[in-house]
Image (tube, rainbow, N blue to C red):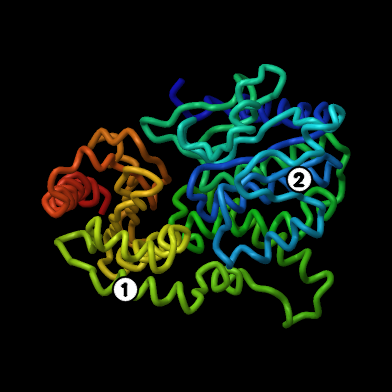
Amino acid sequence: MKKSELASLAQKNNIAAGIAREIARKETFILTGHMDPDMDCVASLITMALLLRKAKKEAVIYLPGPVAEHFNYLFAICKAHGVLVMYGGGLPLFLTREPRRGVTAIFILDTPKPEMISLNDAIAVLMEDARVRRIEIDHHLAADALYAGDEGYCLVTAASSTCELLCYLGYKMAKQFGWKKDSDILSRNIYLAILTGIIGDSNMGRYLKTRREKWYYETVNTRFHGLLGSIVPKGTGFATEDMFDIIYTFSVQDRRCYDSLMALAHESKSVFYIALSKDVSQSVIDQYGTERMVTVSKVAADTLAEQSGRLGLVVYHDDDRDSGFVQCRLRRSSIYGGIDLRIVLEKLKIGNGGGHPGAIGFRIPKTEIKNFDSYTEKMVESIEKLLEPAAKARV
């Protein structure tokens, strides 16, 4: 079924309360997100794991491989709270040899549709097991977004980020588990993880549009700093701007990769873009790795958007050894008329993608592209023709 916004606050409350009750009944949870996880995806995995540990449940995060170094502070928190993080491969032995601790539910987080879920063979089997509850939490509502969770256990609706929805779920869990004080409901570490997701998906709040989104951001930010201030001397705390700097801090190799991409930027009327041919893409991936290409391409798209004042686009070929797709990252400038970029996926009938108003990602099978240069030029023209009238209408 296609994803759609929840019809009412009552429906949202009922689903969140139902998920909280299910957490109380279950013991061991696998948490997974989408392939090539971004900031909101990683932060939502960690937020949910910390909430589960707070409820004294087993939590195992699955990732297809190592993620960017700037998430180390969050994974350090996971380790301190007994959250197991596994990268690829099968399941830990304690989940398969001890029935009492076997997986009883799977959380699918920040993933637009089933085919984008990050899985290994063992988790794929569990996904098909009727005894294992599939719980989905997501904010992607693009035209091609599809449910992956069980009916009644999909907290899927409009939000700035999946982490915003997890903040909401946390307060429903508080009622279920009897957490009363604010510091008991969501600890500073949980607020930190939530902020990472909101900041990452909204570019330090620049992409937030609705009053509700802005309220969540300010509330989480205020409460995090309030909790931090209770244990850290005034003037020596950790500001949200510091977190933003950490998230976007580059290593030497990141910087070199970024510079190599930015040197290939082109300008059109409304879009600053980078389009890497198959050979150039493979050369960059061979030198810097797929993980770094994914991370840096998103930052490059952000930079191009702000430089153009409108839109930034990065297009590159996946590693031929892994897949047969061309990856596309489209970002909107913070001052570009409040345009919802998801309209691009709908109007151009792109079936393999998703995102939020300020940023989308999609991929095109390489077999559909006969001439890469011509294809990207036409893509840029189509995006400009589609978004320019909408932007003028909002001025």
Which mark is first along the chain, 2 or 1? 2
**Which quarter of the image is occupied by the C terminus?**
bottom left
> Image check: 179 left or right of 154?
right
**Which three-letter amino acid code belongs to the residue tagged 1?**
Ser
Residue at position x 84%, y 71% from top?
Answer: 231
Tell me the tag on residue 117: none
Residue at position x 52%, y 74% from top?
Answer: 249
> Image check: 236 left or right of 389?
right
Q: Position of residue 368 (x, y in %)?
A: 20, 38
Residue toward you, 294 or 284 = 284
> Image check: 339 left or right of 230?
left
- Mark 2 neighbour density, 10 Å: few (under 14) some (14–19) many (20 or more): many
Q: Is residue 384 visible?
A: no
User: Which SS class for mark 1?
Assistant: helix
Q: Position of residue 174 (x, y in %)?
A: 81, 40
Q: Is residue 393 above or below residue 154?
A: below
Q: Are marks 1 and 2 in contact (CB under 8 Å)?
A: no
Q: Position of residue 384 (x, y in %)?
A: 18, 51
Q: Quadrant of residue 13?
A: top right
Q: Quadrant of residue 235?
A: bottom right
Residue at position x 81%, y 40% from top?
Answer: 58
How much space separates mark 1 and mark 2, taking CA atoms? Answer: 40 Å
User: Which SS class for mark 2?
Assistant: helix
Tell me the tag on residue 51: 2
Residue behind mark 1: 260
**Which three-letter amino acid code belongs to the residue tagged 2?**
Leu
Residue toward you, 195 or 98 = 98
Toward the bottom, the furthest residue is 235
Residue toward you, 172 or 381 = 381
